């Protein structure tokens, strides 16, 4: 006699094996919001903070600022050394006083040096007919000359030629403070004797213009006109 099969038990909830969590289940000690938050340490995500391109731009900006600062300091220092506080000499007895044409004050100063007996000869650059030539000075030979070309280079060439003609072994040059460095450079290329520079400061309002002019003229003398 056969035994009838027993009735099947109604289906109940499926219990996952121990140690395996079901999808959507919340682990003990973890809230639902914690579970839904993305993993910040997952591969492919940048760490919190400034991005690499931003840091690179910052470094380039800092390097640019430092470079501009260094260049500005070098330019300012060179300007002061060359044109504001150039090397100057105290007046001393020489064979001739030579005045280069330019800003006001040179003429009177050159004449005063000649009257004080620093040299038996005073040579004054008068580029145009309107420029004054000093009146006679006792015991001083006054020479007025027009340089060719009408530049510091022309004045230096004339000075060298006159020194060879008259036997000047030393000269005292009167010019402006801003022109001292360039005038010395030009003269040393043409004249081998002793050169003393005794400058006169230009009017205050003329300083910016004269410094800018001297920078351009100095570059020209160093790069384009390297001979006498």
Image (tube, rainbow, N blue to C red):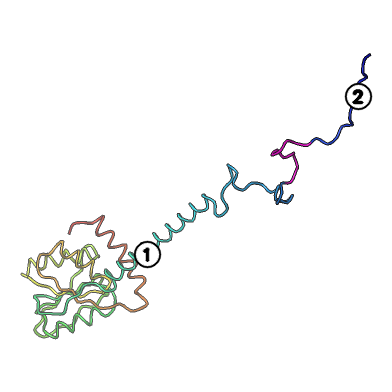
Where residue 166 appears, as percent x and y from the top left, is 6, 70
Q: Which residue is drawn at 36% across and 70% down?
A: 209
What predominant SS class does the magenta segment belong to?
loop
Identify which residue, 170 or 139, lies in the foreground. 170
Q: In this view, does 144 lie above or below 148?
A: below
Which image quarter: residue 138?
bottom left
Q: Whole-percent x and y of residue 42? A: 60, 44
Q: Residue at x 12, y 79 (%)?
A: 92
Which label belongs to residue 177?
A: none
- The mark found on residue 6 in the picture is 2
Classify 220 as above or below 92.
Answer: above
Query: Helix, strand or loop at disc 2?
Result: loop
Task: Please give left or right for residue 108 compared with residue 212 in the image.
Answer: left
The picture places residue 70, in percent across and down from the top left corner, at 36, 62
Task: Quadrant for the N terminus, please.
Answer: top right
Identify the image quadrant of residue 72: bottom left
Q: In which quarter of the image is residue 146?
A: bottom left
How far apart, in angstroms, are the residues tagged by discs 1 and 2? 102 Å
Q: Is mark 1 on a helix, strand or loop?
A: helix
Q: Which residue lies furthest to the left in this view?
A: 167
Numbered label tally: 2
Highlighted magenta segment, given as a residue range: 15-26
Q: Earlier in the sequence, mark 1 or mark 2?
A: 2
Q: Which residue lies furthest to the top in this view?
A: 1
Q: Which of 67 and 210 is in front in this view?
A: 67
Which numbered mark, 1 or 2, is in the foreground of this view? Answer: 2
- Image-based side of 146 in relation to 92, left or right: right
Label 1–label 2 contact, CB within 8 A: no
Residue that numbered label 1 is attached to: 72
């Amino acid at each position: 006699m056969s035994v009838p099969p027993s009735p099947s038990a109604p289906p109940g909830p499926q219990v996952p094996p121990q140690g395996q969590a079901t999808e959507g289940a919340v682990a003990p000690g973890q809230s639902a919001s914690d579970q839904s938050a993305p993993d910040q340490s997952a591969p492919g995500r940048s760490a919190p903070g400034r991005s690499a391109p931003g840091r690179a731009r910052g470094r380039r900006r800092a390097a640019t600022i430092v470079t501009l600062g260094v260049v500005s300091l070098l330019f300012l220092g060179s300007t002061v050394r060359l044109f504001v506080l150039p090397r100057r000499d105290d007046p001393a007895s020489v064979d001739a006083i030579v005045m280069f044409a330019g800003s006001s004050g040179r003429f009177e100063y050159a004449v005063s040096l000649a009257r004080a007996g620093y040299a038996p000869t005073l040579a004054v650059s008068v580029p145009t007919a309107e420029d004054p030539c000093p009146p006679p000075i006792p015991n001083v030979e006054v020479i007025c000359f027009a340089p060719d070309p009408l530049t510091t280079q022309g004045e230096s060439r004339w000075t060298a030629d006159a020194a060879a003609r008259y036997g000047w072994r030393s000269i005292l040059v009167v010019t402006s403070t801003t022109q001292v460095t360039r005038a010395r450079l030009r003269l040393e290329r043409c004249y081998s004797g002793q050169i003393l520079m005794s400058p006169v400061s230009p009017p205050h309002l003329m300083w910016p213009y004269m410094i800018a002019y001297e920078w351009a003229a100095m570059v020209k003398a160093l790069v384009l006109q390297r001979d006498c």
